Image (cartoon, helix red, strand yellow):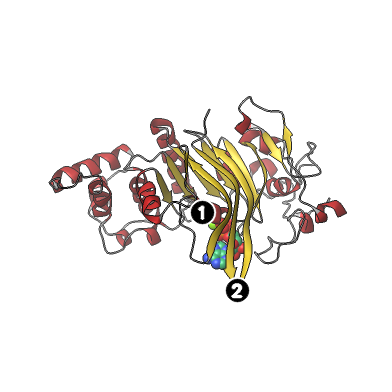
Amino acid sequence: MTPLLRVENLGVAINRGGKKLSALDGVSFELYPAEILGIVGESGCGKSITALSLAGLLPGAAELTSGSIRFAGRELRGLPEGELRTIRGREISFIFQEPALSLNPLIKAGAQIAEALELEKKPGGRRDRAAIRERALRFMERLGLREAERIYDSYPHQLSGGMCQRVMIALALIRGPRLLIADEPTTALDVTIQAQILDLMRRVNRESGTGILFISHDLKVIRSISSRVLVMYAGKIVESGPVEEVFAHPRHEYTRGLIGSIPGRERKGKPLVNIPGKVPGIGERLPGCPFAPRCGRAERRCFEAFPPETIFPGAENPGALHRAHCIYPEPRPAEGEH
Ligand SMILES: Nc1ncnc2c1ncn2[C@@H]1O[C@H](COP(=O)(O)OP(=O)(O)O)[C@@H](O)[C@H]1O
Ligand SMILES: [Mg+2]
């Protein structure tokens, strides 16, 4: 199957104090049509920079230094901002952690959705406010937004965090994008609302075939929503594969450490293992495996060079293979399980 998105050898540098510091290094992955691909990793690993780099949303201090981003067969790297903006409006949508920051506080929620619909209007077409309102309301109802009318007529500050996130999702989806990039979309929400938002995203994926790149530091969320997962550490993808496979047989010591840190029923009574140390900031990164300084099994060679990728036999689809960059790829129980 041809991927909807193919990212190859992506590099991003951030200018800080006159120096170019590497934030992403050799990031490669594919996202297939109608797939939910997760990205997981601790805070500061480069998940958001990855998301922002895909359709020209990097902050001013950051720049792409290498690689290719092919979306629906078209190279996005190097496209002029105007074309990227068109792609962001129609084909690739984003939702972020803080809906309140992405919504315009001065405009009623419904008017913001209506505006997105009006952008579709043909030049010279007559604006029909009542018809647009009707379409927006029907769409909100189809997404399962109860009280669509009340939401439509509210300002963002009059809505709860969960409602705002639903409005954001409606805004992101109303023009039928092929790819939705969701960066920590449920992190600011309480558990019940989080579950409802995840359900909503699953339903959209199933019913409309929208591909979703779902980013979270929360392994439980990633496990429950994605079919495949990329594990990211210090600007690199250290492991990837089908989600159940990665959780059952993690091949990288970082993934094993993350899984060992999940609190939960299955681990009741067992000690919670946290990975000692912290993610190196950009500018603190050394050669070799970036996880080596925190890894209980690191050998000298881990500090010298980033281990090559090991590919594990898996499904027939090459994108569904299980891959890891670790010298200890053999299956071993996750930390805290023994
Ligand atoms: N605008 C920026 N200026 C300087 N450094 C940044 C900027 N954005 C991100 N970084 C740095 O890049 C690294 C990756 O950040 P980010 O992609 O936000 O991580 P994550 O989303 O995984 O938490 C971090 O070390 C962070 O401090
Ligand atoms: Mg982030």
Q: Quadrant of residue 19?
A: bottom right
- The answer to whether any part of residue 299 appears in the image is no
Q: Which residue is at a point 76% across and 58% down the rendered structure image?
A: 287
Which residue ends up furthest to the top in the rendered image? Answer: 316
Q: Quadrant of residue 223?
A: top right
Which residue ends up furthest to the right in the rendered image? Answer: 300
Q: Which residue is at a point 58% across and 68% down the rendered structure image?
A: 15
Q: Which residue is at a point 64% across and 42% down the rendered structure image?
A: 265
Q: Which residue is at a point 42% across and 36% down the rendered structure image?
A: 210
Foreground residue, 96 or 25? 25
Kindly identify which numbered label has been placed on residue 53. 1
Q: Specify the quarter for ligand 1.
A: bottom right
Locate residue 144 relative to residue 63 in the image: left or right: left
Residue 129 to residue 2: above or below:
below
Q: Amino acid at mark 1?
A: Ser
Q: Secondary structure at mark 1?
A: helix
Give the Cα distance between marks 1 and 2.
21 Å
Foreground residue, 271 or 248? 248
Sequence-wise first label, 1 or 2: 2
Q: Amino acid at mark 2?
A: Gly
Would you name the residue on which mark 2 appears? 18
Q: Residues within 10 Å of mark 1 (few under 14, many from 20)?
A: many
Foreground residue, 328 or 282? 282
